[in-house]
Image (spheres, helix red, strand yellow):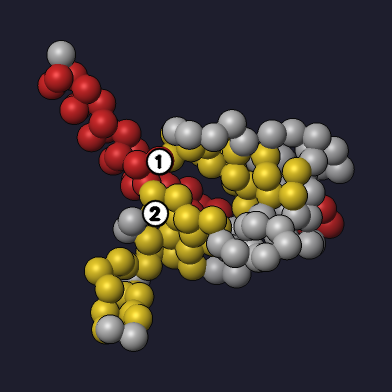
Amino acid sequence: RRRKEDAAGPVRMTTLYEDDFVCLTDEGIEIKWYYFPTTISKKIQWDEVKCFRLEPVNLFTSKGWGMGFSNVWWACDTLRQFSCDQAKFLSVSTVEGCCRKGFSCRNLMKVKDIMDKYAGIMRAAEAQQSTRKR
């Protein structure tokens, strides 16, 4: 874990995991190299995550960057199609938006554990709030 800093000093956000493709913080997910052709990252707050899942990679449903014949928009990973390790590709569905956001990661188990914990906490808190309103 490490703290992100900016010119004004420390920011409260804590980095839980980071590699070449994704950064998970206590506030959400940053999918690096997401938008084509600008390479700008996609940031998703934990309370926006509806679910996440493993995505098998094949010639038709995935792509090095962009959308294949599926509803997943893949962040840039030009070696994705050539990987024999299928257990490092995830997608995130958000509460708004019809297309899933796909990305690679170097340590699937760590990413999955963090996403289970943080996305699960947000879902549980929302469920409690909705039952209290009734």
Q: Which of 76 and 52 is in front in this view?
A: 76
Query: Which disc is residue 28 wearing?
Result: 2
Relative height, residue 104 to residue 16 (above, below): above
Examine the image and state in which quarter residue 79 appears: bottom right
Q: Residue at x 32, y 34 (%)?
A: 123
Quadrant holding the N terminus:
bottom left
Which element type, helix, strand or loop, lies under badge 2? strand
How far across and down, in percent of the image, does residue 25 sit? 38, 61
For label 1, the residue is 48
Task: Say what amino acid the circle numbered 1 marks.
Answer: Glu
Task: Say what amino acid the circle numbered 2 marks.
Answer: Gly
In screen coordinates, is 80 left or right of 101? right
Query: Which disc is residue 89 wearing?
Result: none
How far across and down, in percent of the image, does residue 20 sit? 60, 69
- Residues at circles 2 and 1 in contact by the CB criterion of under 8 Å: yes
How far across and down, in percent of the image, does residue 105 sit? 59, 58
